[in-house]
Image (spheres, rainbow, N blue to C red):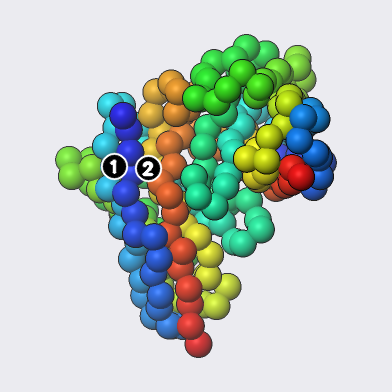
Amino acid sequence: KAGVTQTPRYLIKTRGQQVTLSCSPISGHRSVSWYQQTPGQGLQFLFEYFSETQRNKGNFPGRFSGRQFSNSRSEMNVSTLELGDSALYLCASSLGRQEETQYFGPGTRLLVL
Amino acid sequence: GQSLEQPSEVTAVEGAIVQINCTYQTSGFYGLSWYQQHDGGAPTFLSYNALDGLEETGRFSSFLSRSDSYGYLLLQELQMKDSASYFCAVSSPGGSQGNLIFGKGTKLSVKP
């Protein structure tokens, strides 16, 4: 089975721009979670989608949004980029039950200048 | 809130054994996972303990004590390639922290 894939792998944007990141989960997985990872804050939960519905949401501003499609692929969008949004954005997929293991993609490294 | 504590750094020599501890405080608990992350890479799943006791996978073992809210990852016969960050993570009912709550990570440095 192919693993979780994320595109693009690297991205450079300037302040004020917006960005869309994509995540394709492992085949058969219906839950996709997004995390932001920075050296100072570690792995912080952004949101989780299950069957096209947002099931959980972290404490991030409304500039961060996401969605999930019927094939379980997910996108996240960040609008009005700030310097502090520079981070590694990771998505993880699981079958769907809350206690199940999550498997991570390679991440998208975003640099905001 | 919910939190996990693990040491920030550990150093050991090749061939040695190292134990990385993790204590947690959560309002709900399904199990404890461990992930490995090399610099510039993504977290890779290592092990999951839902019940008390020891789980062994090759050179790696993971232990859980639910009554003590404590677990550890044991790495044996350390190799240079084991130099990485190791995260413990609690699976719990979802909320603002999600279904998987991570510790800050332990950076393991393996010296020759």
Residue B102 sits in which quadrant? top left
**Which residue occupies the foreground of this view, A110 or A48?**
A110
Residue at figure coordinates x 39%, y 60% from the top left: B8
- Would you call the spot at circle 2 few (<14 residues within 10 Å), some (14-19), or many (20 or more)? many
- Res. A54 mark: none
Q: Chain of mark 1?
A: B
Q: Are marks 1 and 2 in contact (CB under 8 Å)?
A: yes
- Would you call the spot at circle 1 few (<14 residues within 10 Å), some (14-19), or many (20 or more)? many
Compared to residue A84, the image places residue B36 above or below, namely below
Amino acid at dot 1: Tyr
**Which residue occupies the foreground of this view, A34 or B79?**
A34
Q: Is residue A32 visible?
A: yes
Amino acid at dot 2: Leu
- Res. B32 mark: 2
Horizontal and vertical percent for residue B109? 48, 73
Compared to residue B54, the image places residue B95 above or below, namely above
Horizontal and vertical percent for residue A94? 58, 31
The quadrant of the picture occupied by the N terminus of chain A is top right
- In the picture, measured across the screen, residue B11 lies left or right of residue B82, that is left
Q: How many marks?
A: 2
Horizontal and vertical percent for residue B83? 53, 70
Q: Which residue is mark 1?
A: B24
Q: Chain of mark 2?
A: B
Mark 1 and mark 2: Cα distance apart in space: 9 Å
Sequence-first disc among 1 and 2 = 1
Compared to residue A28, the image places residue B14 above or below, namely below
Residue A37 sits in which quadrant? top right
The mark closer to the camera, 1 or 2, is 1
Horizontal and vertical percent for residue B10? 39, 69
Residue at figure coordinates x 52%, y 19% from the top left: A56
